[in-house]
Amino acid sequence: MTRDFSVPQTRKLVTALPGPRSVELQERRVASVSRGAGTLANIYMESGSGAILVDVDGNRLIDLGCGIGVTTIGHAHPAVAAAAAEQASKLTHTLFTVTPYENYVRVAEKLAEITPGDFDKHSILVNSGAEAVENAVKIARKFTGRRAIATLDHAFHGRTNLTMAMTYRPWPERAGMGPFPGEIYSVPISYPFRDPEGMTGEEAAERTIDYINTHIGATELAALFVEPIQGDGGIIIPAPGYFKRLSEFCTENGIVFVADEIQAGIGRTGTWYSIEHHGVVPDLVTSAKGIAGGFPLAAVTGRAEIMDAVQPGGIGGTFGGNPVSTAAALAVFDVFEQENLLEEAKRVEKALWARIGDWAEKFPVVGEVRGKGAMFGIELVKPGTKTPNPDALKAVLAHATANGVIPLDAGSWDSVLRLLPSVIISDELIDDAATVLEEALARVS
Ligand SMILES: Cc1ncc(COP(=O)(O)O)c(C=O)c1O
């Protein structure tokens, strides 16, 4: 289909990056903003359309990150902008738990429709991914009467105190921030690139189960949280069969199986939820990021009997499921259907494989290229080894951002180049961005 963009879908640099106005803003920022809010590139943005960001100096940059997987349908989609503006002029707040409104109910209905599983589902709407994960923990504990929570190695579940404890790597997320809540256990994941050669998904699942049995005890475990495709962990896609066996184990032992789909869900990988690639139906699903085109909204959706285990008033919050955010989400769902965006995600996957699929053969610093839909990781290593190469990633990011391409970093060793473009990015922009990344990979190789 043809789309109207307010900004040409091409990269164009009119200054060095960062440009003079960005440099000026950066000076003000250093004087006023906590350095804890670290940035990948100090290029200040003014507008965006489709897969292009426009900075304050008039440069047009290719966005391969979508603000970590949020603007999946493209920047400033006119349908989302119109829905949000209309809602903002009608009603911006009541607090759903004081006096409700229809948008909230419609989003919950839609989530029940698109999340995996053919059973009664209920939802709660909140503001952020971490808040959704926290609520999923509360709900699973209340339902099971158990306390222990298991997460997978390399997981990222957020930056609140509880979700930091559920996040794998100490630096930079957790360092110096404790104490953390107890009863949170990190268990081994299936990581095909780093597992013993030939290890199957089922074997990796047995390793995980053995760890749970020997370190936690299955009957103590309230919930297992998994990212079906790990995002911040480095686009780790567990081997086929891994999640199927784990979900059977959870069912056999009364453990709530939670798919954290905050990064990989809402159509990014060519299905509404990435767990669908693994043929597994989770008990609870968390959604956020791409759900509302950039407006703050997140959700926990799942089996009605689990979601309803909580007493009225036990979950909620002032802004959760805000009228404007939910209006934006309803527009996102419509756009996905009207513009056939699940298919677009598959087109992006095909274009990426065709363009970057041979990088491990071409560049000695590339250990593996992996991905699904518009979610790819390029794991960088010291040539001839599997030793992580964070210096190479730093150099690639520096070259890319200086040349008007914004990818992301990822991985427990900061050595995975992460691509989360919009599903409407054109093949031409993928080609142009890949050329810039290739220049960098050739240099560091
Ligand atoms: C899988 C996953 N869970 C949870 C979160 C936390 O979401 P938020 O930053 O909205 O709190 C993220 C954010 O990157 C995520 O990728």
Image: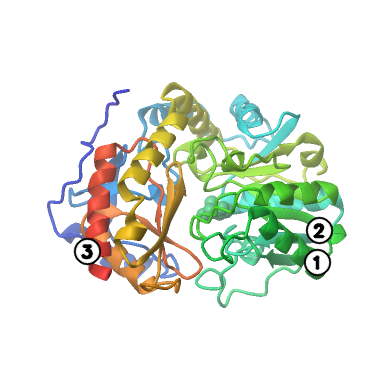
Indicate the amino acid at tag 1: Ile
Determine which quarter of the picture holds residue 150. Answer: bottom right
Q: Is residue 428 visible?
A: yes
The answer to which of marks 2 and 3 sits earlier in the sequence is 3
Q: Is residue 367 above or below residue 66?
A: below
In the image, 323: left or right of 224?
left
Mark whose residue sits in front, 3 or 1: 1
Q: Tell me residue 221's x, y (percent).
A: 81, 58
Q: Tell me residue 224's x, y (percent).
A: 72, 54
The answer to whether the residues at label 2 and label 3 have Cβ atoms under 8 Å apart is no
Indicate the amino acid at tag 2: Leu
Q: Residue most toward the left?
A: 14
Q: Secondary structure at mark 2?
A: strand
Which one is in front, 133 or 239?
239
Residue 216, numbered circle: 1
Mark 1 to mark 2: distance in Å?
A: 7 Å
Residue labelled with disc 2: 221
Mark 3 to mark 1: distance in Å?
A: 51 Å
Question: Residue at horizontal 46%, vertical 28%?
Answer: 336
Which one is in front, 445 or 47?
445
User: Mark 3: is the Cβ under 8 angstroms from ligand 1?
Assistant: no
Q: Residue most toward the front?
A: 198
Residue 23, numbered circle: 3
Question: Residue at horizontal 67%, vertical 75%?
Answer: 179
The answer to whether the residues at label 1 and label 2 have Cβ atoms under 8 Å apart is yes
Mark whose residue sits in front, 2 or 3: 2
Question: Residue at horizontal 68%, vertical 71%?
Answer: 180
Q: Secondary structure at mark 1?
A: loop
User: Mark 1: is the Cβ under 8 angstroms from ligand 1?
Assistant: no
How many circles with numbers are drawn on the protein? 3
